[in-house]
């Protein structure tokens, strides 16, 4: 059974391209509202549920937050693929920073992994807002992923990096 997000459509959460702009426990500047540090956010859910959800080929969507969970699961899969050859935390950090510098496509642009999952942006302003949110959430996910993919002594955690070989929803990671 697929793990779904606990963030169901809540009142007061703004959306871009049909995706809720959920609060993040983040120090990274961006359009996401700031969440309390002791609460669970969507990045925590994505990392916690990744190792179970990556085994599924189908993912039934129960709330719009599940769309974001799908996107983050795929992004974690890409990040782990990049970390696969990195033997130290320093090498892994460099690989993740390079991943963060890549362009972030939005729905309707080539390179967006899930056409049809999110609505197309109605205005250029919505496109920029969604791109900035995805960039912020990817950077936050990358930082937190490093803390689980590598042990405190800087060596790779094989119980995490082994999942780099998995295909999520039968999508081949570039």
Image (tube, grey):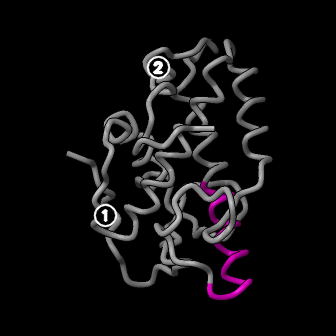
Residue 128 position, x and y percent, is: 73, 75
Q: Residue 87, relative to residue 3: is it above or below? A: above
Query: Residue 22: where, in percent of width, then height?
Result: 49, 67
Position above or below: 83 against 6 = above
The crowding category of the residue bearing disc 2, from other C-alpha atoms within 10 Å (few below 14, some 14 to 19, many at least 20), is: some
Q: Magenta segment, principal secondary structure?
A: helix
Residue that badge 2 annotates: 162
What x and y, as percent, mark residue 63?
32, 69
Q: Residue 171, position in %: x, y?
A: 48, 43
Q: Which residue lies under the disc numbered 1?
A: 61
**Horizontal relation, residue 132 to residue 148: left or right:** right
Classify mark 1: residues with Cα within 10 Å, few (<14), some (14-19) or many (20+): some
Residue 129 on the magenta span: yes
The residue that appears at 43% across and 54% down in the rendered structure is 70
Residue at the far left: name it: 1
* Residue 135 versus residue 45 in the image, above or below: below
What residue is rendered at 58% in x and 45% in y?
A: 141
For this view, does 130 lie left or right of residue 6? right
Q: Which residues are magenta?
A: 122-137
Q: Residue at x 68, y 67 (%)?
A: 109
| Disc with the residue nearer the chain's start (2 vs 1) | 1
> Element type at marker 1?
loop
Which of the two residues, 8 or 68, is positioned nearer the viewer here? 68
In three-dimensional space, the C-alpha distance between marks 2 and 1, rounded to whole angstroms, equals 27 Å
State the quadrant of the C terminus. top right
Q: Is residue 83 above or below residue 63?
A: above
- Per the image, label 2 sits on a secondary structure element best described as helix
Of 45 and 80, which appears nearest the observer?
80
Question: In the rendered view of the protein, which quadrant contains the N terminus?
Answer: top left
The front one of 122 and 44 is 122
**Residue at figure coordinates x 53%, y 65% from the top left:** 115
Contact between labelled residues 1 and 2, with CB atoms less than 8 Å apart: no
């Amino acid at each position: 059974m697929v793990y779904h997000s606990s963030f169901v459509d809540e009142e007061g959460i703004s959306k871009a391209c049909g995706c809720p702009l959920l609060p993040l426990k983040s120090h990274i500047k961006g359009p996401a509202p700031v969440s309390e540090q002791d609460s669970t956010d969507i990045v925590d859910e994505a990392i916690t549920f990744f190792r179970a959800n990556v085994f599924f080929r189908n993912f039934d969507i129960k709330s719009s937050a599940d769309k974001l969970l799908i996107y983050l699961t795929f992004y974690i899969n890409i990040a782990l693929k990049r970390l696969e050859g990195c033997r130290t935390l320093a090498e892994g950090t460099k690989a993740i920073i390079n991943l963060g510098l890549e362009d972030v496509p939005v729905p309707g642009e080539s390179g967006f992994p899930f056409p049809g999952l999110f609505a197309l942006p109605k205005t250029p302003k919505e496109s920029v807002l969604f791109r900035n949110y995805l960039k912020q959430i990817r950077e936050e996910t990358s930082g937190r992923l490093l803390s689980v993919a590598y042990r405190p002594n800087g060596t790779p955690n094989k119980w995490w990096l082994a999942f780099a070989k998995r295909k999520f929803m039968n999508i081949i990671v570039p």
